[in-house]
Image (tube, helix red, strand yellow):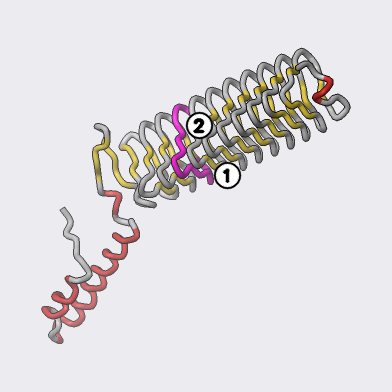
Amino acid sequence: MKARFKLTDLAALSRHLSTAPFSFLKSVFCGAILRRRISDLKGENVENEMRDISGIRYRRHRNGGGWVAETAFVADEARVTTGARVSGRAKVLGTAQVTGGAYVSDNAVVKDRAIVTDRAVVEGFAVVSEDAKVYDSAIVYGHAQVHGNALVYEDAAVYDHAIVWGCAEVFGAARAWNYAEIHGNAKVSGKSWIYGRAEVLGQATVSGNAAVFERAQISGTAIVKEYARIYESAKVTSGGIVCGSLVKGTTVVSADLKDSSLEE
């Protein structure tokens, strides 16, 4: 076991090495101890520290001091801070960051400049990449992908084969699953459900308790909210507003067809 010195030990050491013949040795040796102590404080020597957590062997990552399972891989340039954990066969690559109390597990990959923080969870075969961020208590799992500059936060969940990309945001208690796609500058919030092969894109917003599913598409500056249901191959395009109504079949809702014209 390597000896560790406290800064208070230097005073005693200095007295023993105070005579002239030892002055050079004193300066070199004390300098080395100080450098080692500073490295310890910065977390640069923590990679040799090991711990068993739930029967799994973990080591501290040199860049941040977070726990990394022996079966997982974290690049030297990536950051895993104290409180965060990477387990299973997960990978953290590039300069990605796993911080706060975040947890990355199974075969998940966090790479490029992506950030997973707070109490967020990324697991399964999920991939978070590029400049995407998953935070608060959000969860991304299954084969889901979050990339580009996309944000998934608060209590949102993205799973199965759903994809969130571009500058899209999924937040609140929203859910996206199956093969749903949310991209562009779209925002999905509240307790909304996006599933099947539905797509939300452009500047569109889906909020409240709305559901968009099957092959429905919400695009442009469309607004879908409250208890609206958009399904089958229906579309809501720029200027279209659906507030609590059902839109199905091949119906197209645009600026010329407002919510009052639709089936309640």
In the picture as drawn, the residue positioned furthest to the bottom comes out as 20
| CA gap, disc 2 and disc 1 | 15 Å
Q: Quadrant of residue 73?
A: top left
Residue 77: where, in percent of width, then height? Answer: 44, 50
* Residue at x 15%, y 53% (from the top left corner): 1
- The residue located at (47%, 46%) in the rendering is 97
**What residue sits right under mark 1 in the picture?**
131
Q: Where is residue 216 in the image (x, y as percent from the top left)?
A: 71, 20
Neighbour class for label 1 at 10 Å: few (<14), some, many (≥20)?
many
> Hey, what amino acid is under mark 2?
Val
- Residue reaching furthest to the right: 256
Q: Is residue 113 magenta?
A: yes
Expressed as whole percent of the image width and height from the top left, the position of residue 230 reads: 71, 20
Q: What stretch is highlighted in magenta?
A: 111-127
Q: Which residue is drawn at 48% across and 38% down?
A: 137
In this figure, what is the number of numbered marks?
2
Q: What residue type is labelled 1?
A: Asp
- Between residue 57 and residue 8, name the one nearer to us: 8
Please tell me the numbered disc located at residue 140.
Answer: 2
Q: Where is residue 74 in the image (x, y as percent from the top left)?
A: 40, 42
Check residue 87 for magenta coloring: no
Q: Based on the displayed image, in which of its 4 quarters is residue 248 positioned?
A: top right
Q: Is residue 4 left or right of residue 102?
A: left
Figure quadrant of residue 153:
top right
Callout 1: helix, strand or loop?
loop
63 lies above or below 234: below
> Nearest the camera: 45 or 260?
260
Badge number at residue 152: none
Q: Using a 10 Å C-alpha cutoff, classify the residue at mark 2 as few (fewer than 14 neighbours), some (14 to 19) or many (20 or more).
A: many
